[in-house]
Amino acid sequence: MFPEFSRPGRSVLLAGALLSFLNGTLYSWSVFMLPLEQGTGWTRPQTSLVFTAILVFFGLGMMSGGVIMRRLGPRATAALGELMLALGLAASSFASAPWQIILAYGGVAGFGIGMGNIVPIAVSVRWYPQQRGLVCGIMAFSLAFGTLLLGSGLAATLIDIMGVSATLLFMAALILAGALPASAFLKYPAAAAVPHEVTSKVRTESLTTLQMIKTKNFRLVWIWALAIQTGGLMIIGHIVPCAIERGASPAQAGLVMGICAVINGLGRLLFGSLFDAKGFRFAMLADVFCMIAGLLFLAFPPTGSVLAGILPGVALIALSFGGTIPQFSAYIASSFGPAHLENNVGMTATVFIIAGFAGPFAGGCLHSLSGSYQAAILAAAIMAAPGIFAILNVPSSCPK
């Protein structure tokens, strides 16, 4: 894959991928929940609030990161975000009350990762404007791979060996050791060293964030992303209990979750590449049809083994879900100009925040009302359908 990229920007791309990989650490919160509950007596609602805080502050960090990046530049912004991430993890190791870890892990670290997450995307697409989809896919894949390897792998292993507090400190040190040097490589190409110094022609073709959100193009693609993310999270947020309800053992349900995480990452690369090769309309329609097909397959599985009835549907759902945000970021980069790219890409976080609340919450409510996940699965398919009509109505011309 990397031979496709010109040599001057490869160090930037690799540094951005490393930064995104390390940022995936924050989403490993689930591996800390049970050990903390067992060791402190904290309740599940209390520990669950940490992930809620992560979602909120991650979004706020992304939306603020563009403004900070335009003032401080990419290197300083990335370094500041990673320092906040490490500080939040380190402070969490000393937490003695739920509100303290909510503030440290969810608030400080969550805001830091949001700020740091936007830099690799905004910088890399300037180096490779013809490969925006693939570049966004690489960064998103690296984030997911980091969550799987550093969270489910390394952090979970270290908790068993040295406990929660020491593991949090170790992860903070790991981020400082890897992310700060990587931040030093994140720079704009010479032709766009500072966003303010773009040519007058680019200025007229670039839209501010306020101008962007007023366009029909942005609103329709936003609806498309929200439809897929909400429907996908309604199931992905409950994938383990859903699999067990379908007859899977706890070990099999864990396997399904792991496969879901891997395919989610691959979907970011696949649909990012498809965006570049076939254009936004083809790639985004393929994405939403993939989600609906996966949900219908999960709702009406073929007869056979338990895993054979679960995995194909889950794989399609994860593939589609993974491809959404990279394509949204690539569409913003290609349609609204480079002058305000940092701020504009940050608006993808609004989808993440809303869907992160609405999807899992609605799935839980539907399960409580109906007694099974069938209603949630069918509701997710219905929720994803508006994404088709949204993309079919997006004008092909760039917005003005």
Image: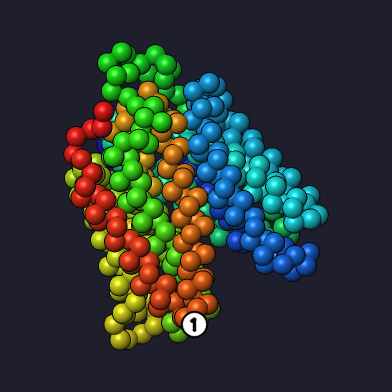
Callout 1 environment at 10 Å: few (<14), some (14 to 19), or many (20+)?
few
Determine whether, in the image, residue 120 is placed left or right of residue 280.
right
Q: Nearer the viewer, residue 83 or 283?
A: 283
Q: Nearer the viewer, residue 111 or 385?
A: 385
- The answer to whether residue 146 is seen in the rendering is no
Expressed as whole percent of the image width and height from the top left, the position of residue 348 reads 42, 43
Q: How is the image coloured?
A: rainbow
Above or below, 70 against 224 in this view is above
- Residue located 79% across and 55% down the image: 97
Tell me the element at label 1: loop
Expressed as whole percent of the image width and height from the top left, the position of residue 1 reads 30, 43
- Residue located 42% across and 16% down the image: 196
Quarter of the image for the C terminus: give it.
top left
- Residue located 47% across and 28% down the image: 186
Determine whether, in the image, residue 369 is placed left or right of residue 91.
left
At label 1, the amino acid type is: Gly
Expressed as whole percent of the image width and height from the top left, the position of residue 114 reads 54, 40
Above or below, 253 against 383 in this view is below
Q: Nearer the viewer, residue 139 or 177?
A: 139
Residue indicated by mark 1: 371
